[in-house]
Amino acid sequence: MAVTPSPDSPSADAWWRTAAIYQVYVRSFADANGDGVGDLAGVRARLPYLAELGVDALWYTPWYRSPFADGGYDVADYREIDPALGTLAEAEKLIAEAADLGLRTIVDIVPNHVSSAHRWFRAALAAGPGSPERTRFFFRPGRGEEGELPPNDWQSQFGGPAWTPTGDGEWYLHRFAPEQPDLDWTHPDVRREHEEVLRFWFDRGAAGVRIDSAAEVVKDPGLPDLAGRTAFPPGGHPYIDRDGLHELYRGWRVIADSYHPEPRALIGELWLPDADRFAHYLRPDELHTAFNFDFLTCPWDPDRLREVIGGTLERHAPVGAPPTWVLSNHDVTRHVTRYGRSGDTGFSFEAKTRPVPATDLVLGTRRARAAALLALALPGAVYLYQGEELGLPEVEDPELLPDSARQDPMFHRSNGSDPGRDGCRIPLPWSGDRPPYGFSPPESAAPAWLPQPPGWGGHSAEAQSADGSSMLNLYRAALRLRRDRPALRGEEFAWLPEQPPGVLAFTRGRARAFACVVNLSSRPVPLPADGTLLLSSEPLPPGELLPDTAAWLALPPVPTAD
């Protein structure tokens, strides 16, 4: 299989097509004022670290005013920064200072819902049944003789019914936590408000937006029961992937494209199993790009990885959209931990149960190093979740992360049967050998919202900067080569034929002068004899690639037509 850019593709110079984008979970990144919670001032102080790492853009999970019932994804006001994190003026400084270092900013937009503390929802509760204020949301009378039953059988993503009674005979819909009431996108106020929010942040220098739960925004107005159904015709699910979404995102694309000289980027969080339906969102007048969850959830298996990579490239090519590659984010178990488990090392929400499976972190780290070189060598954009460049594992041990410290609604609404996502959100270690490991200023207390485990200092940025073989320095070297090698800035891709079983190998560039080789087998394999080693995930014996190891090679260029 070989992939080359479509002649109808947008310009390959568009930054979002090939960017390395670093996800910042602000509360866990760096704390400047010593209150134990990460803040915008802490991010500003660490911008030189991010620039040295070699990424191109920073994506911030929601930093807006919020009660933080769901990590800030319950937004009370998009035009204010939460006081625990900073001020709007600080956000503007952060965007500008990052731009001075060559780092673009992506902000998170959550169109499916707002916080129950949002002025609209407070007004809706106060106004009562039948009021215009309630038409921005989904308020419905309950079923049953006394209205004691939910209006339909929909379930929350976080467990339990997707409806909460208001005490006045009506219930309101929330596909996530009760503190996150769903918006009704047939209401003109909802559309107008979000368009204004986009312009608000684009005008302040944001280079793009990441759209949370992008496939769940539009609902069937009849709110029909699922009645146990799991299969629906295309566009027929009552709240996922409905056709009305495309008109919505076309309108947003007009706004994004109106900015000059650089249009803003729209990036969708789309969990969709149907490849054709997924590609529809990436047509030239809709979203610029979307997250590739097939790659994130794929286990450490050569055949399945090859299938996912090939399938990803094939479904993006017809619409001229770049693929994306993601190994971890704030919602999933960190891949160092996933890759250290036996059996299927992929991820699904349903698979997160307690007690958690045993993990071989030595094996997981070795595979994570190889996976980093694999992801960074593929054509398209790549997303890095804060701390993956430090090789951080998931914190799962209840002695290190006790139930009393957990805050994720997935944990609480499942009565503890689902451990939730707090284990991948532990505050980062920057320096030192005891809490707060440089996360907060010297002599500050330990982080206030999630505890750091003992031994976290060995993962710190300071310790790893001094170790030439560390995960951090591997990422720095790979990102530098990714930026400097012309073959890795294009979109050309071809599998190398006739590889040993368990090996993935491909070339990049028109002249095929760069190769990535990944050994997922249990025995060493020979490297291409005509290759010159540029970088490897582990030290290698001459001419061999060890198990669970990846290498980048320079190859003699193949003559091209021009």
Image (cartoon, rainbow, N blue to C red):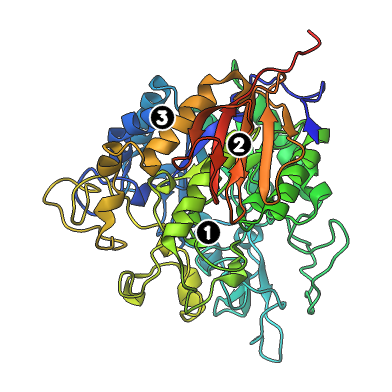
Q: What residue type is labelled 1?
A: Tyr
Position of 478 compared to 554: left or right? Answer: left
Q: What residue type is labelled 3?
A: Ile
Q: Residue 160, position in %: x, y?
A: 59, 78
The residue wearing badge 2 is: 527
> In terms of sequence position, does the residue under pointer 2 or pointer 3 come before the other?
3
Q: Residue 332, position in %: x, y?
A: 52, 59
Q: What residue type is labelled 2?
A: Leu
SS category of the residue bearing label 1:
loop
Viewer-side residue, 14 vs 333:
333
- Within-10-Å neighbours for mark 3: few <14, some 14–19, many 20+: many
> In terms of sequence position, does the residue under pointer 3 or pointer 1 come before the other?
3
Dot 2 and dot 3 residues touching (CB under 8 Å): no
Q: Residue 325, position in %: x, y?
A: 61, 42
Q: Quadrant of the C terminus?
A: top right
Compared to 508, does 140 lie above or below?
A: below
Which numbered disc covers residue 95?
3
Position of 2 compared to 166: left or right? Answer: right
Q: Residue 26, position in %: x, y?
A: 38, 47
